[in-house]
Image (tube, helix red, strand yellow):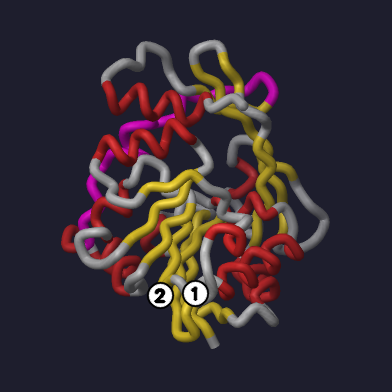
């Protein structure tokens, strides 16, 4: 299986990257900003936006789609943190950077990886919940997340709001006639290798609330201030 995305970030970390990581949709392509997205330190004391996120989490924590370990490196100093990534190269990168428990795994197969009530909190930052593919898929993911977290667990996830007027400017954006829903389609390429096309579903906060019904989760807060003025938002969830 290809791993262009993960290899580019690993090579960047090791100082071996000589070509850009490209993300694209059809003929439209951009250079993906690796350093800014994956290697800046996460320090909640620096601003209220990071404190908002950190204050919502407790241990044990599962970091889903942990990337290069930006959040895991901070939270593992506070409590037990398990960093989960499907990319072997990113798991290598996290271990190189000092993440104590970096594992290769699928965030959409949590019941196969962890026992019931294993975690006190979950973090999924990077809009990867959109890979659930549909409202039903998101509901199934939240149900699985409820299974592997304690009865009083919390979680923080993020997404793009298709109801925001700037959402249509996103690379790979596709409209949907249903209010609160859209698609995003894009691929990553690096050093002659192209990963399979990623197909995200974009959910408005109201659609996220809808998906959470019956899963054991409720939306406690929506944060837009900490994500800028565009369509990106973070959601804090709590078990009911």
Residue at image point 28% right, 50% down: 100
Q: Which mark is residue 149?
A: 1
Residue at mark 2: 120
Q: Is residue 58 magenta?
A: no
Q: Earlier in the sequence, mark 1 or mark 2?
A: 2
Quadrant containing the N terminus is: top right
Q: Secondary structure at mark 1?
A: strand
Whole-percent x and y of residue 56?
A: 36, 74
Magenta-drawn segment: 26-44
Q: Quick one: 195 or 146, which is closer to the camera?
A: 146
Circles 1 and 2 in contact, beta carbons < 8 Å: yes
Q: Is residue 154 left or right of residue 127?
A: left
Tell me if mark 1 has few (under 14), some (14-19) or many (20+) residues whose alpha carbon lies within 10 angstroms of its own. many
Residue at image point 57% right, 79% down: 217
Q: Is residue 116 left or right of residue 109?
A: left
Q: Is residue 234 left or right of residue 159?
A: left
Q: Which mark is residue 186?
A: none
Q: Quick one: 190 or 161, which is closer to the camera?
A: 190
């Amino acid at each position: 299986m290809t791993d262009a995305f993960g290899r580019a970030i690993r090579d960047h970390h090791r100082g071996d990257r000589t070509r850009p990581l490209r993300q694209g949709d059809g003929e439209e392509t951009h250079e993906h900003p690796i350093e800014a997205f994956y290697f800046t330190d996460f320090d909640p004391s620096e601003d209220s936006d990071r404190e908002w996120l950190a204050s919502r989490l407790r241990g044990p924590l599962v970091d889903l789609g942990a990337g290069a370990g930006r959040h895991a490196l901070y939270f593992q100093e506070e409590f037990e943190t398990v960093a989960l990534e499907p990319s072997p190269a990113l798991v290598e990168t996290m271990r190189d950077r000092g993440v104590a428990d970096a594992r290769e795994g699928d965030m959409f197969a949590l019941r196969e990886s962890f026992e019931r009530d294993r975690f006190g909190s979950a973090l999924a930052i990077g809009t990867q919940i959109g890979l659930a593919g549909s409202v039903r898929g998101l509901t199934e993911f939240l149900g699985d997340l409820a299974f592997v977290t304690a009865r009083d667990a919390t979680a923080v996830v993020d997404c793009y709001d298709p109801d925001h007027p700037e959402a249509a400017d996103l690379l790979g954006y596709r409209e949907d006639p249903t209010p609160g829903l859209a698609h995003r389609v894009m691929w990553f390429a690096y050093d002659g290798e192209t990963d399979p096309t990623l197909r995200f579903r974009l959910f408005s906060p109201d659609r996220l609330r809808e998906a959470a019904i019956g899963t054991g989760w409720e939306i406690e807060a929506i944060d837009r201030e900490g994500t800028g003025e565009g369509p990106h938002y973070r959601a804090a969830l709590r078990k009911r």
